[in-house]
Image: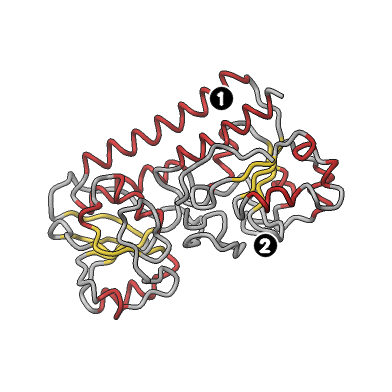
Amino acid sequence: MRIAHTLPVALLGVTLALTACGTSDPEPDSGSGTEPAGDGAFPVTVEHVLGELTMDEEPERIVSLSPSNTEMLFAIGAGEQVEAVDEYSNYPEEAPTTDLSGFTPSVEAISEYDPDLVILSDSAIDTAEQLDAVGIPTLVLGGAADLDGVYEQIRLLGEVTGNTEEADAEAERVETEFNEVVEATLAELGDVDLTFYQELDETLFSATSGTFVGQIYDAFGLVNIADQADDDESGGYPQLSAEFVVEENPDLIFLSYGDEAAAEAVAERPAFDTVSAVETDSVYLLDADIASRWGPRVVDFAEAVGEAVSETANQ
């Protein structure tokens, strides 16, 4: 069983929010709802899910309750300003992980860290209003809907933390490196004519091309078999049947959960030994965090996908 690009064990579940597959901090694929503002000086006003947030001074004690945003904060040089992060913010290693919940945040628990800025996902809007009531500035960010949303959120966090130049540089780096990975893969292979299936959990939930994670694969020209099973009720995350997967016969299968044993078990499913991805040993195990968080490590995700595509196409 081939493992795609060994990545650091460390993504809020854009892809996993509806699948309960147990990875970090699921958040909806709802778009950032934000626009950067200001020039790095304070006071600065930014737009977020709840409207406008004005910071009179550079924050010195930030509490981040979203793994994706935690990764962005450290990537833009704001790590020393981060006082505490939620239980699923496990990357980078120096992040001050606590038992704070990003799903059901406690105002009392958050207040113990005396924050001058709290960053929440848009699934915790009620908590944001409670924090505002006790005078704690709160920034609410939804899941990035696309790569442009990633770059916007990186820059917005730079504005609100006083790290504008670093954030601009990081957003440019991520965009440039992502594009380089895709371009190098396509230059090597030409037009890619491969189908794939990403399995989010053992119950065969998947993600369509309309989701954030689906767009990563689409950048490589891969055809997503889940698109045919999408409907208005799935929200971009349809649950497929084993029979459907076998019939569609994908060239690659990506698992964004479990371990090598889970990947090996795919071949043991009834009729899966006839699936092209199994026959050619093209079942790839992804790092669950990297494959479900938007942020700086989308480059790592692209590298893993690019390597898998190259290996499969060159067989």
Q: Residues within 10 Å of mark 2 (few under 14, many from 20)?
A: few
What's the residue type where badge 1 is placed? Thr
What's the residue at 56%, 41% (across, down)?
Answer: 215
Residue 156 position (above or below residue 62): above
Gap between marks 1 and 2 measured at Cα: 34 Å
> Which disc, if any, is residue 233?
2
Going from the N terminus, do you reach mark 1 or mark 2 first?
Answer: 1
Q: Which quarter shows the N terminus?
A: top right
What's the residue at 29%, 48% (across, down)?
Answer: 36
Drawn side of residue 291 relative to residue 116, left or right: right
- The residue that label 1 is drawn on is 185
Drawn side of residue 63 relative to residue 295, left or right: left
> Which disc, if any, is residue 45?
none
Residue 200 percent coordinates (x, y): 63, 54
Residue 170 percent coordinates (x, y): 31, 38
Label 1 sits on a secondary structure element that is helix
